[in-house]
Image (spheres, rainbow, N blue to C red):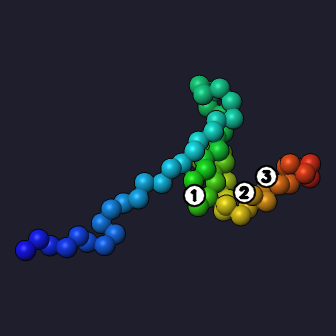
């Protein structure tokens, strides 16, 4: 008898988009976006936002509030 596959035995690979804010060799901050959160910063100086917070920030920038 063949054992049934275990539930959750596959790991989902999340896609993360990474955008550099300047030339790749300059060591500048990056914006990393995935399905659940957004990270902005560099090395030990990182700000983590939820998707909702990120959308609010984008809207404030677009509206000229920031």
Quarter of the N terminus within the rendering: bottom left
Residue under label 3: 58
Query: Neighbour class for label 2 at 10 Å: few (<14), some, many (≥20)?
Result: some
Residue at screen point 60% across, 28% down = 24
16 vs 5, nearest the viewer: 5
Q: Quadrant of residue 53?
A: bottom right
Residue under label 1: 35
Q: Quadrant of residue 2?
A: bottom left
Q: Secondary structure at mark 3?
A: helix
Percent x, y of residue 33 = 61, 50
Instruction: Judge whether 8 appears above or below 31 on screen.
Output: below
Spatial separation of the CA atoms under disc 3 and disc 1: 16 Å
Judge whether residue 52 can be spotted in this image: yes
Spatial separation of the CA atoms under disc 2 and disc 1: 12 Å
- Residue furthest to the left in view is 1
Q: Earlier in the sequence, mark 3 or mark 1?
A: 1
Q: Secondary structure at mark 1?
A: loop
Instruction: Judge whether 65 appears above or below 51 on screen.
Output: above
- Disc sitting over residue 55 in the figure: none
Residue at screen point 54% across, 48% down = 16
- Lateral position of residue 58 relative to residue 12, left or right: right
- Of badges 2 and 1, nearer the viewer stands 1
Percent x, y of residue 39 = 63, 51
Residue at screen point 33% across, 62% down = 10
Question: Disc 2, disc 3: CB below 8 Å?
Answer: yes
Residue under label 2: 54
- Lateral position of residue 60 relative to residue 14, left or right: right
Query: Neighbour class for label 1 at 10 Å: few (<14), some, many (≥20)?
Result: few
Percent x, y of residue 43 = 58, 43
Q: Secondary structure at mark 2?
A: helix
- Residue furthest to the front in view is 1
């Amino acid at each position: 008898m063949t054992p049934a596959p275990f539930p959750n035995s596959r790991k989902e690979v999340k896609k993360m988009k990474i955008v550099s804010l300047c030339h790749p060799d300059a060591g500048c901050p990056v914006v990393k976006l995935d399905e659940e959160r957004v990270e902005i910063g560099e090395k030990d100086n990182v700000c983590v936002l939820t998707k909702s917070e990120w959308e609010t920030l984008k809207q404030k920038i677009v509206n000229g509030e920031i």
